[in-house]
């Protein structure tokens, strides 16, 4: 069946959103869709944002019914999020961060992390699938005439920093939800597409050939940077994504938690004790107090009241306050300090912000992460596009901008121009839908290809020495910037695989090394330049060959039309023409 | 509460009888004799009145036989609009409205009440704005001199109310109008009268 619509899905760490555009006709407008969800027990509401939370009902509760399923035992969205504060053992949050975390088996039932006994844990892939499935149900409810999302073209966004394995798993979740016409798009690119869509043809007046756009995307859970160049190509303007930042698990939730910490310490100093329910409520209260203080320069402090948990509201509530200097000290100086352009994020683990499991960024300073990202670049950015809920605050945007312009001034470069984005919550979904039109030749495509270069670890031959591991060389199999549908050159090196036995290779990715060609062998690299990913695995089936036979293979990378990386082993002396085996990425936790 | 709700369904004439009967001690003996006299004749000659009295008597008997723990069973049949309960539940959930109004405030300091009021204000405001669009009826500043060309249902005349339009006066209150109200749809098994479930921490 041919799709009539293209649907952009922003599957976010804390919120998800849907937007649609018509594939037929000339209407290029993109609209966000309301997402039906349970907002409280037995109450159905619609919102353009779906909190990315999954709640497993308990036997004491009636079914978590939806108009299309009266017997449902789980809920996705607003009610799931609010239950997360009341019954945390029954709620999955940040499924996306788990999906991208190579330290665990992402196909194994592991969530909720500290699940109650009666819950059958599900994998990060399944959790993502359930969120997508809910979006599909909400789509059917919002557009009954359009049918199922599976019949439409779907563009699913991922952080630019997602490695090949995390992208594969995202596609796996989408396929499980029945979306066979799916393509991936990097979120910062989606934000730029949304800006282009919003400006119509006028966007060309804002960007000139030679411009370099820095996209800074700070959401609830992650921070993502990309650089996109405007270049002259065959006489017209083209856009090319030239660099992406590392995966940084740092976002608005950390900021609210940090402020809640500050206020709770003050309350505790007054001899008041807070339980975990109140800490959760405090984090909420701090978010709204923060927004008020950041929005109104006249306000000196905002009262933060923790309501009593019982029905006696008066007298039982605790009153704290959040003062301007605290917000400035902890948010501006803690998360957006004015740092030198040469600053790098600290790698020392910080106990205060950590939760068991996920590899949260150990340095909360967004500006240091940005400095480290830009330090790799010779050409400084000339324009900036903000995205993500955190950057709705003008004060935080201003600080980021000031700091960046300070660095540029030191280099003698002009200050960046701000590209005015409109809806920072929905831009990614809207941009994804617009990209769906671009894939049909309606609009300008951002070129860029793969965001990482990939390397296979090769142990160098050396005599065994006690206590000394043989050094590992990194063989580049996929260069940075491979376009969809292209193949990398075959590296000259041969690897040896035993038929019938699984062979694992160490696997590395780099967002920093952008000039290595396939076949380049690195004997050493700078700290942080290569990130080790979960190992890749290859098992040669014994078809036509004897078990135990050693086969020489070369590894060839290609990029699928969906935008995922494919790695294949090609036999040096094939038994049949074009004998090759696919290598599975992201098999299990390291 | 139970009695009052049960009486709502009756016509006003009978409701007076009902309310007087309920507050039995306040009706004098002479009054009761008069009532018995009037009622006995109306029961004899007015079939509809007789039916209502019979209904009243029957429901009185039913109420007496009900166990005290199940008042909802009676209340449910004459419940006000479910939307009102839903709005109450929303105001309670977001802004602890029922908690606040139901608590006795006399013994608390203004500071305590003020702290609680912040919770109520912020939460109720959020709930109201999320589900209703409330706009002022008059755009002029309060205290401004206003001329009203014609009497209008959304402007109440106060003070020296006399004469005919146009009316000239000082705007004392701008008024509020709900332009849009969208309450969450209900789905599945639920009890609308539970505006806040009791909470039991395990």
Image (cartoon, coloured by chain):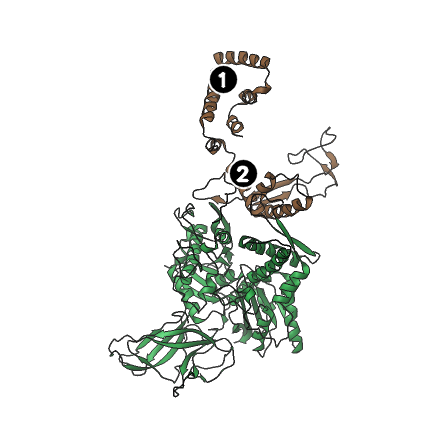
Chain colours: A green, B brown
Where is residue B15? Give x, y as percent. 54, 22
> Which subunit holds the residue at mark 1?
B
Q: In this view, does A322 lie to the left or right of A97?
A: right
Judged from this view, the residue extending furthest toward the bottom is: A463
For label 1, the residue is B49
Where is residue B45? Give x, y as percent. 49, 12
Of residues A18 and A296, the one nearer the viewer is A296
CB atoms at circles 2 and 1 under 8 Å apart?
no
What secondary structure is found at the residue carrying circle 2? Answer: helix
Residues at marks 2 and 1 on the same chain: yes
Of residues A488 and A82, the one nearer the viewer is A82
Instruction: For residue A266, say whether it is visible.
Output: yes
> Image height check: is A468 above or below B146?
below
Q: Quadrant of residue A210?
A: bottom right
Q: Quadrant of residue A584?
A: bottom left
> Image height check: is A285 above or below A437?
above
Where is residue B16? Give x, y as percent. 56, 21
Which image quarter holds the N terminus of chain B?
A: top right
Which label sits on residue B84? Answer: 2
> Which subunit holds the residue at mark 2?
B
Q: In this view, does A27 lie to the left or right of A308?
A: left
């Amino acid at each position: 069946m041919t799709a009539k619509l293209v649907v952009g899905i922003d599957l976010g760490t804390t919120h998800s959103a849907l937007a649609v555009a018509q594939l037929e006709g000339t209407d290029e407008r993109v609209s966000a869709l309301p997402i039906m969800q349970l907002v409280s027990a037995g109450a159905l509401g619609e919102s353009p944002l779906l909190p990315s939370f999954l709640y497993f009902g308990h036997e004491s509760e009636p079914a978590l019914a939806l108009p299309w399923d009266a017997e449902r035992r789980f809920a996705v969205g607003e009610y799931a999020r609010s239950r997360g504060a009341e019954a945390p053992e029954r709620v999955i949050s940040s499924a996306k961060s788990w999906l991208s975390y190579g330290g665990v088996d992402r196909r194994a039932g592991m969530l909720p992390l500290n699940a109650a006994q009666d819950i059958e844990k599900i994998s990060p892939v399944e959790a993502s699938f359930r969120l997508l499935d809910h979006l599909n149900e909400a789509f059917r409810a919002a557009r009954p005439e359009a049918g199922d999302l599976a019949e439409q073209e779907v563009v699913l966004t991922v952080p630019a920093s997602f490695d090949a394995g995390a992208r594969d798993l995202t596609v796996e979740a989408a396929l499980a939800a029945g979306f066979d016409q799916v393509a991936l798009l990097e979120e910062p690119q989606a934000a730029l597409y949304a800006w282009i869509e919003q400006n119509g043809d006028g966007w060309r007046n804002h960007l000139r050939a030679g411009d370099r756009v820095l996209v800074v995307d700070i959401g609830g859970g992650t921070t993502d940077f990309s650089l996109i160049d405007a270049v002259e190509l065959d006489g017209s303007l083209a856009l090319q994504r030239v660099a992406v930042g590392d995966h940084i698990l740092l976002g608005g939730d950390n900021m609210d938690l940090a402020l809640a910490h500050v206020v709770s310490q003050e309350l505790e100093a007054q001899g008041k004790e807070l339980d975990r329910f109140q800490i959760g409520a405090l984090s909420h209260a701090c978010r709204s107090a923060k927004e008020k203080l950041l929005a109104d320069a006249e306000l000196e402090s905002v009262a933060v009241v923790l309501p009593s948990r019982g029905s006696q509201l008066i007298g039982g509530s605790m009153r704290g306050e959040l003062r301007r200097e605290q917000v400035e000290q902890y948010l501006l100086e803690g998360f957006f300090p004015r740092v030198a352009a040469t600053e790098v994020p600290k790698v020392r683990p910080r106990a205060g912000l950590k939760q068991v499991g996920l590899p949260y960024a150990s340095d909360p300073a967004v500006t240091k992460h940005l400095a480290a990202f830009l330090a790799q670049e010779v050409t400084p950015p000339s324009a900036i596009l903000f995205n993500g809920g955190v950057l709705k605050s003008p004060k935080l945007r201003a600080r980021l901008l000031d700091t960046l312009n300070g660095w540029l001034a030191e280099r003698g470069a002009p200050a960046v121009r701000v590209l005015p984005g409109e809806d920072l919550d929905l831009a990614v979904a809207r941009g994804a839908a617009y990209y769906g039109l671009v894939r049909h030749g309606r609009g300008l495509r951002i070129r860029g290809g793969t965001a990482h270069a990939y390397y296979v670890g090769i142990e160098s031959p050396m005599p065994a020495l006690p206590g000394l591991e043989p050094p590992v060389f990194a063989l580049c199999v996929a260069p940075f910037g491979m376009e969809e549908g292209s193949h990398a050159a075959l590296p000259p090196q041969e690897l040896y695989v035993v038929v019938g036995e699984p062979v694992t290779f160490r696997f590395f990715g780099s967002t920093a090394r952008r000039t290595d060609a396939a076949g380049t062998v690195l004997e050493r690299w700078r700290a942080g330049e290569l990130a080790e990913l979960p190992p890749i695995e290859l098992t040669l089936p014994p078809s036509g060959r004897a078990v135990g036979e050693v086969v020489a293979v070369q590894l060839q990378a290609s990029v699928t039309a969906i935008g995922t990386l494919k790695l294949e082993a090609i036999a040096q002396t094939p038994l049949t023409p074009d004998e090759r085996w696919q290598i599975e990425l992201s098999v299990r936790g390291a | 509460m139970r009695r009052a709700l049960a009486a709502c369904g009756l016509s006003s004439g009978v409701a007076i009888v009902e309310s007087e009967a309920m507050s039995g001690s306040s009706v004098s003996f002479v009054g009761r004799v008069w009532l018995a006299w009037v009622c006995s004749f109306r029961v004899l000659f007015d079939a509809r009145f007789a039916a209502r009295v019979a209904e009243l008597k029957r429901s009185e008997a039913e109420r007496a036989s009900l166990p005290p723990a199940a008042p909802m069973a009676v209340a449910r049949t004459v419940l006000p609009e479910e939307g009102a309960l839903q709005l109450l539940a929303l105001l309670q959930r977001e802004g602890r409205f029922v908690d606040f109004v139901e608590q006795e405030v006399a013994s608390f300091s203004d500071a305590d009440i003020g702290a609680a009021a912040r919770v109520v204000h912020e939460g109720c405001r959020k709930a109201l704005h999320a589900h209703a669009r409330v706009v002022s009826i008059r755009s002029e500043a309060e205290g401004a001199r206003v001329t009203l060309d014609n009497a209008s249902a959304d402007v109440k005349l106060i003070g020296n109310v006399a004469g005919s339009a146009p009316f000239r006066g000082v705007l004392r209150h701008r008024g509020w109008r709900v332009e849009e109200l969208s309450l969450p749809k209900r789905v599945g098994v639920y009890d609308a009268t539970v505006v806040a479930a009791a909470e039991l921490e395990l």
